Structures are given as C-alpha cells and as structure tokens.
Amino acid sequence: MDICQDDWIPHTATVRGWDLRDKSDPDNSPFPGFSAMYARARAMQIEQEVDEIRSIADTARIGVKVSVKELPGGGSIREVTRGDMVERSRLQLDARKWRAAKIAKNNYGDRIADMDARSDNPEGPRIIIEGGLPDE
C-alpha cells in the first residue's frame, strides 16, 4: 500500500488490522464499514492500473541503454544505445496484467470456455476431441 508510506497515514499493519477486525467482528470495529470501503478502494486501484496499460503501450519512453561487451583478448567495449525502452514498458504492462488477473479474477482472469469446468462436476472438465485420430 503505497499510500501508507506518507507520514500522516497510519502504518500498513494498522490499516490491514482495521480491515480484518471489521470483517471478523463488525460490531466492535473501530471504523464500521471500513472493510467494504477498503475493498472498493483496492478494486479502484486495479482499475486505475488497467487504465494505465494503454498509456504505457502508446507512449515512447526514450532512454539510454548501456551494455559492456568483453573482448576475447581482454578489455571491453561499452556500447551506448539511445531509443525507446521497450523492455521496461513490457515489464510494466506484464506486471499490471498479472496483478489484474490475480486480484480481479472475475474481470481480468483467464476464462475457461467449457461450462463443465466451472460446475461441480467431480470428474473435472469435459474435453471434446473433434475429427478423431488420424488414420495410420
């Protein structure tokens, strides 16, 4: 929780304690309804991160990449490249997609197309093979 880094905000452990106490014993919660507000704030945080995906993908980030190559006889060459930091943008995109898929599974998680996979079918998902096996 980045907001808990500020001096005027309670420590992360305090905020999570309020959340847990409100969930487990709402009648004795120091802040009734805190858990629902906290859950909504976290959902809004994920939505904000998802909204950032397009901006990250569409915005060039010009930077400098330095690599050092060792020479066979000893010594090294320093190679400096200036350009779009594609690897950094990809990392930011992947991190946001992963968080969204893990935290907001219903909206951004992987979906299973077959309804049997989501049912209480004790045999597990139904697999259909179309076309059969190739002739020998």
Image (tube, rainbow, N blue to C red):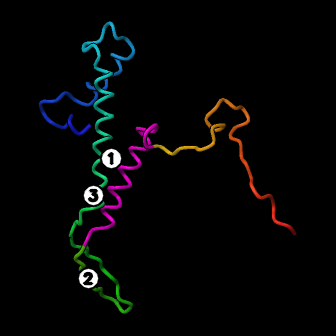
Relative to residue 76, is residue 108 drawn left or right? right
Label 1 environment density (alpha carbons within 10 Å; few <14, some 14–19, many ≥20): some
Residue 15 located left or right of residue 102: left
Vertical placement of residue 70 versus 55, above or below: below
Q: Is residue 90 shown in magenta?
A: yes
Amino acid type indicated by mark 2 = Arg
Taking 7 as reference, is 77 above or below it?
Answer: below
- In the image, the segment drawn in magenta is 84-108
| Other-residue count near label 3 (Cα within 10 Å), few / some / many at <14 / 14–19 / ≥20 | some
**Which of the labelled discs sits on residue 56, or is there none?**
3
Q: Amino acid at mark 1?
A: Val
Report the residue marked by disc 1.
Answer: 50
Q: Which residue is mark 2?
A: 78
Question: Would you identify the image quadrant in which residue 77 lies?
Answer: bottom left
Residue 13, image x and y in percent?
28, 28
Magenta: predominant secondary structure element?
helix
Is mark 3 in CB contact (under 8 Å) with mark 1?
no
